[in-house]
Amino acid sequence: MAVVWAVPEDRAVQDWKLQLGEKLASQLTTCGYKSSQRGKLLHLKM
């Protein structure tokens, strides 16, 4: 499990949760993990 804290600058954007989830999923995929954003949780497969 991972906890991600958004900085205030990121939270100022209307859809910040979606953008943060997409960036995180992209980074994890780049590192070799299979990841996808679903609902409120980000599911990871290692």
Image (tube, rainbow, N blue to C red):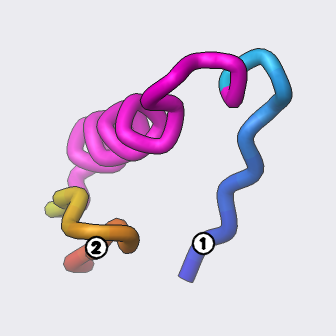
Please give left or right for residue 32 compared with residue 8 in the image: left
Instruction: Tell me the amino acid under the disc marked 2.
Output: Leu
Q: Is residue 37 left or right of residue 11?
A: left
Q: Nearer the viewer, residue 46 or 5?
A: 5
User: Percent position (x, y) of residue 37?
Assistant: 23, 58
**Is mark 1 in CB contact (under 8 Å) with mark 2?**
yes
Task: Please identify the quarter of the rendering in which residue 3 is found.
Answer: bottom right
Residue at x-position 76% and y-position 50%: 5
Which residue is label 2 attached to?
A: 44
Q: Which of the marked residues, 1 or 2, is nearer the chain's N terminus?
A: 1
Q: Which residues are magenta?
A: 11-33
As displayed, is residue 45 above or below residue 15? Answer: below
Residue 19 against residue 24 in the figure, above or below: above
Mark number, residue 31: none
Q: Secondary structure at mark 1?
A: loop
Dot 1: few (<14), some (14–19), or many (≥20) neighbours within 10 Å?
few
What type is the residue that disc 1 sits on? Ala
Image quadrant in which the N terminus is located: bottom right
